[in-house]
Image (cartoon, rainbow, N blue to C red):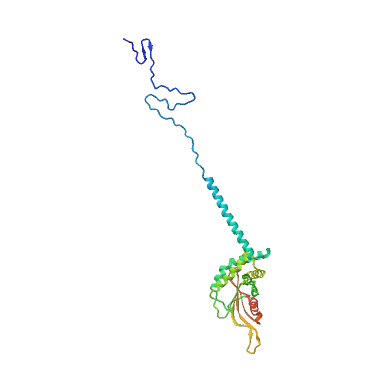
Amino acid sequence: MSEHVRDSGQVGRETVLRPRGAPVPILAEGTAPITAILAEGTAPYPIPVAQPAVTARRIWPWLAGALVLAGSAVTGYLLLAQRSERAAIEERFPTVVDAGERSALEDEAGRWNRGKDRLLATLTRFTPPALDTLTGAGACPLEIDPELAIPTTDDPDAAAQTRVIVMPGESLDGLDALARDEIERMIAASERGRFRTDEGKTRVLRAIRGAFVVAMITEHQAPGLDRAGAIRPGTAAGVAYAFDPATGALRCAGSFRSTSDEASFESATVRAVSSSLRAID
């Protein structure tokens, strides 16, 4: 009867070795096993293998470039439009003010801009007061333009004036609207700083330095011929009021009368208005 040794694998003189676990795979030199060697009774598991990284295509540089190009195109268009507009203005208004005139226009335009709303509010509800209800004396502290604008060209700047003359029977309704048009046209011309003609430039400079005057003509007779055929001079009389452009306040008032021939009737009336104004409290 053969001798048997349990677990030793030995029978008689021969020894047979029996492996207790799974055989170790023989690998080629330089390779690694695909599965790990596990303890008895466990299942093999895969060893994770690193996958090559996939680099996403970057889009933002293209978007940024497109935005830069679009912005440059818009900026270029705006600059071209501004240059074209400036060239058109320079062609339309070739007369340029010098440094001193520009400074004066800027200062006076600022004065009118500061008081425009208050002045227009005053004119909206203006009821001419009787002169005997006003106190004060002395020369008017405001500069008054003694000349009437009679343009010899179709230049609108040459007709700029800060004066409204109300004839007998005319209503004061809309006085503020008339004043607004005159003021805004004058300020626009002064801020532009360029003029179509030298006459227009001179007229705006004279008007913007002055006050705003409302003249109420209570007596008016145009010059002409009398019944005998003789030349009859014209007559204009009434009261005038001057407002401070910076504050909108009524500052000067006075009564006037002028008599002149047909050629100088309007200019004589304006000079009479200007010289009649006196300071009031």
Q: Is residue 198 left or right of residue 171?
A: right
Q: Is residue 149 left or right of residue 30?
A: right
Most foreground residue, 54 or 224: 54
In the rendered image, the vertical position of residue 75 relative to residue 188, given as above or below = above
Spot occupied by residue 34 in the image (x, y as percentages of width and height): 44, 28
Spot occupied by residue 226 in the image (x, y as percentages of width and height): 63, 87
Q: Which residue is drawn at the image coordinates 53% and 46% (left, top)? A: 62
**Displayed quadrant of residue 251:** bottom right
In the rendered image, the vertical position of residue 218 relative to residue 48, given as above or below = below
Most foreground residue, 262 or 140: 262
Spot occupied by residue 73 in the image (x, y as percentages of width and height): 57, 53
Which quarter of the rendering shows the N terminus?
Answer: top left
**Res 281 visible:** no
Task: Count every numbered label the image shows and give the total.
Answer: 0
**Residue located farthest toward the bottom when viewing the structure as drawn:** 228
**Displayed quadrant of residue 200:** bottom right
Most foreground residue, 65 or 43: 65
Spot occupied by residue 126 in the image (x, y as percentages of width and height): 55, 74
Most foreground residue, 257 or 5: 5
**Residue located farthest toward the left when viewing the structure as drawn:** 1
**Displayed quadrant of residue 270:** bottom right
Which quarter of the rendering shows the C terminus?
Answer: bottom right
**Res 179 visible:** yes
Q: Which residue is drawn at the image coordinates 38% and 11% (left, top)? A: 14
